[in-house]
Image (spheres, grey):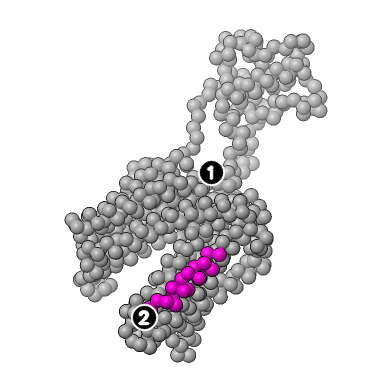
């Protein structure tokens, strides 16, 4: 935690004066053009976050209306069966084996280098792999859905409702698997940093699904038709979005079968499987607590724990919006070599999310028990105070680990996160079982905190710091004052008004060598030797030899010769700046012949 605070402290000094806030507001609203590539990324990130919040609010409103409408229409038993079916089919969302997130990384790199052929290969490979997965799952799960008596399994007692449930499960499975290959559409929007467009389509899907549900209930449809109306409309919107993006918006991304590349598929599958393992580990951590509490403490103990968990999920809502849009931005910036922007964006976003989440968590700790009592109208649903403290600490830790995972995943550094992610999941199960026997539901959440701190937070912070830490080299000695003055005349510095915005300009690759003292000395000796041999010749000859003007002045300001007379120093300076004619010599000397090199 101390390391993280030290890193974040250096990024909280940004100037947010009113003119600057006005600039960012106009930038997000597309009123002005971004001044740099880095500002363009911030613009798209801001647009995605704002539209994400609006879309989330619309989704909550749609769900409230749908629950009130369907619950009174179906009754509690059939409505409960529908919610159980939806929960079971939600696990199919991870059946893409991480191909969605792996596609985002591949597309972001192709977008950074403007490689449309590689982008098409990535999209085609992911799409047809998902088609194969959907077909296999349909053959396996479809047969299981026909053989299982879902009315008995879900404990539906009404005879007419039992028949509806069996057919509803089969239809819901078909619709879910049909939308599995189409899930890459949202990933394409994310990869090209058009998260706002993805949110627009999601909002359209929510509204049309509600309209279809109202029509189905007005026509007195049964449970199967309600599922077709609500879930099927989402698939229809995905199909329309796919036709738009492949037909007009980005036609070069059409997933033609001929564009499938085996090498691309191997690389994509390798990355995707690592992400899939991390998804499973996260699900184990998030879902195992309720199962352990129910098994060891009874089902009635799950209620206060799950309600408190759901309440604290809203405290980290901002992180759930920023992580998906930062992932492709990190990948694209890394592909362009813009490490400085990536470093600043990571620290600024992490600091903002951590501060906001911490403030909300502290507020919930203070008023959480009172709010839950008012919200539920029951004292049995109120968890102990230390559960609220543990949930608050868990959310703050989750912000830091999610930020680190987003960065590491976008860079493809997933080998170690997979290892300590699995260890955290296993440790969470062991600690929760032991602590639940000693401290009840309070021990379960603190066991999760302990497992995450030891096996996830500490190693992820160490790995992230190593990646983002700028390379440092020891300072080199400076050159004599007279040489510096002459070089300053030859290489005048640009005026302040001519300086470009350096927010997104990556350092040149030459800068790594310019800080290398032996390399600088070798270049200096070579240039002086060649000039001593050829003298002051015309520009055509100068273009064939190392020219002093083509070498950064920093190379000649690194070394200070020792033991030279003032006359010899002046001669060297004149050679380097004016390239005077030297007498021809059959055996030209280098500085090493007269100078004792340090």
Contact (CB < 8 A) between labels 1 and 2? no
Residue 33 visible in rendering: no
Pinpoint residue 214: horizontal percent, then vertical percent: 47, 85
Pinpoint residue 212: horizontal percent, then vertical percent: 50, 82
Indicate whether residue 531 is drawn in magenta.
no
What residue do we see at 69% from left, 30% from top?
550
Name the one closer to the observer, 171 or 233.
Answer: 171
Q: Residues within 10 Å of mark 2 (few under 14, many from 20)?
A: many
Residue 37 visible in rendering: yes
Q: Is residue 487 left or right of residue 323?
A: right
SS of the residue under disc 2 = helix
Question: What mark, if any, has residue 230 been given in the picture?
Answer: none
Q: Which residues are magenta?
A: 132-150
How many numbered markers are drawn?
A: 2
Q: Quadrant of the C terminus?
A: top right
Q: Residues within 10 Å of mark 1 (few under 14, many from 20)?
A: many
What residue do we see at 31% from left, 63% from top?
309
* Spatial CA span between label 1 and label 2: 56 Å
Instruction: Write down the residue under mark 1.
Output: 339
Q: Main secondary structure of the magenta part?
A: helix
Q: Is residue 208 above or below residue 570?
A: below
Name the one closer to the observer, 493 or 536.
Answer: 536
Q: Is residue 445 above or below residue 464?
A: below
What residue do we see at 44% from left, 86% from top?
222
Q: Is residue 64 above or below residue 302?
A: below
Q: Is residue 597 left or right of residue 142?
A: right
Name the one closer to the observer, 459 or 365.
Answer: 459
Instruction: Write down the residue under mark 2.
Output: 151
Nearest-to-viewer mark from 1 and 2: 2
Which is more N-terminal, label 2 or label 1?
A: 2
Pinpoint residue 428: horizontal percent, then vertical percent: 30, 54
């Amino acid at each position: 935690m101390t390391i993280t605070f030290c890193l974040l402290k250096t990024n909280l000094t940004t100037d947010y004066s009113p003119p600057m806030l006005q600039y960012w507001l106009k930038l997000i609203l597309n009123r002005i053009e971004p001044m740099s590539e880095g500002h363009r990324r911030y613009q798209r990130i801001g647009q995605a976050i704002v539209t994400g919040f609006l879309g989330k609010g619309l989704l909550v409103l749609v769900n409230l209306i749908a629950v009130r409408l369907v619950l009174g229409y179906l009754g509690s038993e059939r409505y409960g069966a529908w919610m159980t079916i939806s929960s079971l089919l939600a696990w199919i969302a991870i059946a893409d084996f991480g191909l969605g997130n792996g596609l985002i990384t591949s597309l972001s790199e192709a977008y950074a280098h403007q490689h449309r052929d590689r982008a098409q290969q990535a999209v085609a490979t992911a799409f047809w792999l998902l088609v194969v997965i959907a077909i296999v799952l349909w053959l396996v799960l479809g047969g299981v859905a026909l053989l299982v008596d879902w009315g008995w399994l879900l404990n539906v007692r009404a005879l007419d409702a039992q028949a509806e449930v069996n057919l509803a499960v089969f239809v819901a499975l078909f619709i879910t698997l049909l939308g599995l290959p189409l899930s890459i559409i949202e990933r394409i929007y994310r990869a090209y940093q058009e998260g706002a467009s993805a949110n627009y389509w999601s909002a359209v899907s929510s509204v049309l699904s509600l309209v279809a549900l109202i029509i189905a209930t007005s026509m007195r449809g049964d449970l199967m038709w309600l599922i077709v109306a609500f879930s099927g409309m989402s698939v229809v919107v995905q199909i329309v979005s796919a036709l738009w993006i492949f037909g007009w918006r980005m036609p070069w991304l059409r997933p033609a079968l001929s564009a499938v590349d085996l090498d691309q598929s191997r690389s994509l599958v390798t990355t995707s499987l690592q992400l899939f393992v991390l998804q499973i580990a996260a699900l184990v951590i998030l879902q195992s607590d309720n199962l352990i509490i129910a098994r060891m403490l009874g089902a009635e103990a799950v209620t206060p724990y799950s309600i408190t968990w759901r309440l604290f999920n809203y405290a980290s809502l901002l992180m759930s919006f920023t992580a998906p849009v930062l992932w492709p931005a990190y990948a694209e910036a890394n592909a362009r070599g813009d490490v400085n922007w990536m470093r600043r964006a990571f620290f600024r976003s992490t600091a903002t999310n951590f501060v906001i989440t911490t403030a909300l968590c502290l507020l919930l700790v203070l008023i959480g028990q009172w709010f839950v009592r008012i919200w539920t109208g029951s004292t049995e649903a109120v968890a102990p105070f230390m559960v609220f403290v543990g949930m608050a600490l868990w959310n703050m830790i989750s912000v830091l680990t999610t930020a680190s995972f987003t960065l590491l995943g976008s860079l493809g550094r997933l080998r170690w996160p997979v290892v300590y992610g699995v260890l955290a999941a296993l440790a969470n199960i062991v600690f929760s079982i032991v602590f639940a026997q000693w401290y009840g539901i309070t021990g379960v959440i603190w066991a999760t905190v302990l497992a995450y701190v030891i096996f996830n937070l500490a190693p992820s912070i160490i790995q992230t710091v190593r990646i983002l830490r700028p390379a440092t080299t020891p300072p080199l000695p400076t050159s004599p004052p007279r040489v510096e003055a002459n070089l300053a005349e030859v290489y005048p510095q640009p005026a302040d008004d001519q300086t470009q915005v350096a927010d997104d300009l990556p350092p040149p690759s030459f800068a790594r060598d310019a800080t290398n003292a032996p390399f600088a000395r070798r270049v200096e000796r070579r240039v002086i030797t060649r000039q001593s041999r050829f003298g002051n010749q015309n520009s055509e000859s100068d273009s064939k030899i190392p020219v002093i003007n083509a070498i950064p002045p920093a190379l000649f300001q690194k070394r200070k010769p020792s033991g030279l007379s003032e006359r010899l120093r002046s001669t060297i300076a004149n050679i380097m700046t004016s390239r005077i004619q030297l007498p021809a010599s059959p055996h030209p000397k280098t500085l090493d012949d007269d100078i004792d090199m340090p």
